[in-house]
């Protein structure tokens, strides 16, 4: 195993940092891919700039090309831009956390899929969330639209507000809320009329309905195939009506989904659901990583880089574990380890490589390893000479002062680090003794 490990390690050794030229070249390809996926130009520019800042200077992973590595960085930035960051989970899907009857307003251009999506959401809320749902069509411009919603309601087995000829959208909304209150509906979905393009009359009508009904969710329905126009649509609806979420329809088609990114960028509203077909059950939850993959169209490269990066972490961690075992662990290794902990999130990832650790692991985990402290410890070690890192015993009072000044810390902090390192070394020696009693047999060596 030792040999194999070194082999892996040689192959994966880093070779410096991503250069400006590496990044520029890769980003040229990325820019084309994004434009082909129908991401709006300003959004592409913004994303590319952000990625450039992030990528230049990053350490290169040897087993992949710089271009491949940049693509992975773009992918991560895309996932983030689509709402894949931490804490965004709660915003996905429809927010039902409000008193009944909870109004949901559906807005968007004609043909985007509002009526169909209203039916889909009604079905989902009835079946999955056990809600009593009322559907109401405010589309007075096309009588056929009201009939369409009635048919969808029948199929979804929910109630549709009866059609009353000659009523204005506001009157229908008022009647819907009234019926909902009286008949104890949980959710009222108000399906509005669309136009083929944005116009003032439509916006005024929708805004008036919104002001009256005070919907808990205002969902903008957009066709994934609209591409560039989606930005204009999203901006107009968001500025003039205000939206709380986006539903992107026709993701079953061959559009690459760039519209999702543009709309999210322009409105800041989360993408909540996807429409993936004409059938009533063709409604999907939104997964930022899947859409990012589809927009970029380079999923193979992304997973290749992910695997390579994992292998490096694994190989480095195994090397550290081996040093711990041999008792040849010094402050330089400790600095490496801090870096690994930063990446893997915890020490257990590394200790897990050591056989037979058990209780010790918990003990080390508890040793107050928060990230800001790790950063300061990293800075302290960086201010030491290589000789000091290899032989920490050399570090006496005057060296401590120099190191503290160099790292912007205090002598106390330097002392604390040295003490912690001592404790860890001791613990490792004890582990080794235990190991020699048999636990380590069949271990890494
Ligand atoms: P509205 O004018 O915004 O109410 O749009 P509709 O709901 O009437 O939908 C217009 C057309 O798009 C209909 O033929 C729907 O069946 C179709 N449609 C809606 N959502 C989807 C979807 O997610 N995938 C596909 N393939 N077709 C859809
Ligand atoms: Mg409609």
Image: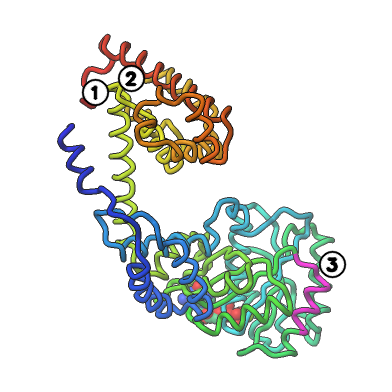
Left or right for 159, reference 232: right
User: Residue 301: where, in percent of width, then height?
Assistant: 30, 62
Residue bearing the label numbered 3: 178
The residue that appears at 71% across and 78% down in the rendered structure is 239
Q: Earlier in the sequence, mark 3 or mark 1?
A: 3
Query: On screen, 128 above or below 172?
Result: above
Q: Nearer the viewer, mark 3 or mark 2?
A: 2
At 57% from the left edge and 83% from the top edge, which residue is drawn? 111
User: Which sits earlier in the primary sequence, circle 3 or circle 2?
Assistant: 3
List x then y, in percent, for residue 426: 40, 16
The answer as to whether callout 1 falls within 8 Å of ligand 1 is no
Q: Quadrant of the N terminus?
A: top left
**Residue positioned 51% across, 35% down in the render:** 402
Residue 103 at x, y percent in the picture: 75, 65
Q: In the orientation shown, which residue stands out farthest toward the left?
A: 3
Residue 356: give its label. 2
Dot 3 and dot 2 residues touching (CB under 8 Å): no
Quarter of the figure with residue 131? bottom right
């Amino acid at each position: 195993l030792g040999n194999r490990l070194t082999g892996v390690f040689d192959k994966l050794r880093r070779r410096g940092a991503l250069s400006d030229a590496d990044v520029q070249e890769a980003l040229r390809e990325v820019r084309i891919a994004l434009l082909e996926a129908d991401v709006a130009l300003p959004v592409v520019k913004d994303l590319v700039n952000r990625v450039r800042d992030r990528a230049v200077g990053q350490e290169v992973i040897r087993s992949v090309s710089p271009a491949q590595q940049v693509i992975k960085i773009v992918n991560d930035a895309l996932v983030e831009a689509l709402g894949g960051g931490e804490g965004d989970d709660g915003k996905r899907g429809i927010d039902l956390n409000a008193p009944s009857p909870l109004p949901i307003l559906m807005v968007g251009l004609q043909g985007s899929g509002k009526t169909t999506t209203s039916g889909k959401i009604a079905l989902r809320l009835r079946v999955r969330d056990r809600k009593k749902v009322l559907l109401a069509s405010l589309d007075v411009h096309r009588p056929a639209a009201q009939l369409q919603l009635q048919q969808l309601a029948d199929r979804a087995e929910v109630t549709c507000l009866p059609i009353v000829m000659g009523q204005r959208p506001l009157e229908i909304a008022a009647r819907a809320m009234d019926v909902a209150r009286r008949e104890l509906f949980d959710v009222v979905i108000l399906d509005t009329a669309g136009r083929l393009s944005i116009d003032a009359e439509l916006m005024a009508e929708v805004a008036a309905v919104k002001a009256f009904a005070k919907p808990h969710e205002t969902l903008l329905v957009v066709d994934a195939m609209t591409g560039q126009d989606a930005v204009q649509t999203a901006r107009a609806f968001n500025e003039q009506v205000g939206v709380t979420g986006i539903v992107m329809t026709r993701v079953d088609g061959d559009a690459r989904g760039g519209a999702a990114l543009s709309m999210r960028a322009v409105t800041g509203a989360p993408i909540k659901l996807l429409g993936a077909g004409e059938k009533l059950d063709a409604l999907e939850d939104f997964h930022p990583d899947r859409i990012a993959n589809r927009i970029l169209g380079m999923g193979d490269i992304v997973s290749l880089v992910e695997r390579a990066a994992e292998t490096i972490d694994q190989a480095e961690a195994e090397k550290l574990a081996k040093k711990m075992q041999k008792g040849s662990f010094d402050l330089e290794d400790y600095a490496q380890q801090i870096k690994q902990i930063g990446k893997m999130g915890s020490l257990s990832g590394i200790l897990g490589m050591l056989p037979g650790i058990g209780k010790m692991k918990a003990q080390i985990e508890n040793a107050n390893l928060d990230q800001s402290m790790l950063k300061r410890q990293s800075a302290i070690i960086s201010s030491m000479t290589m000789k000091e890192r290899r032989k920490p015993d050399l570090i006496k009072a005057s060296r401590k002062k120099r190191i503290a000044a160099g790292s912007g810390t205090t002598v106390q902090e330097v002392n604390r680090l040295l003490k912690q390192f001592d404790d860890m070394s001791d613990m490792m020696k004890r582990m080794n003794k235990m190991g020699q009693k048999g636990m380590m047999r069949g271990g890494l060596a």
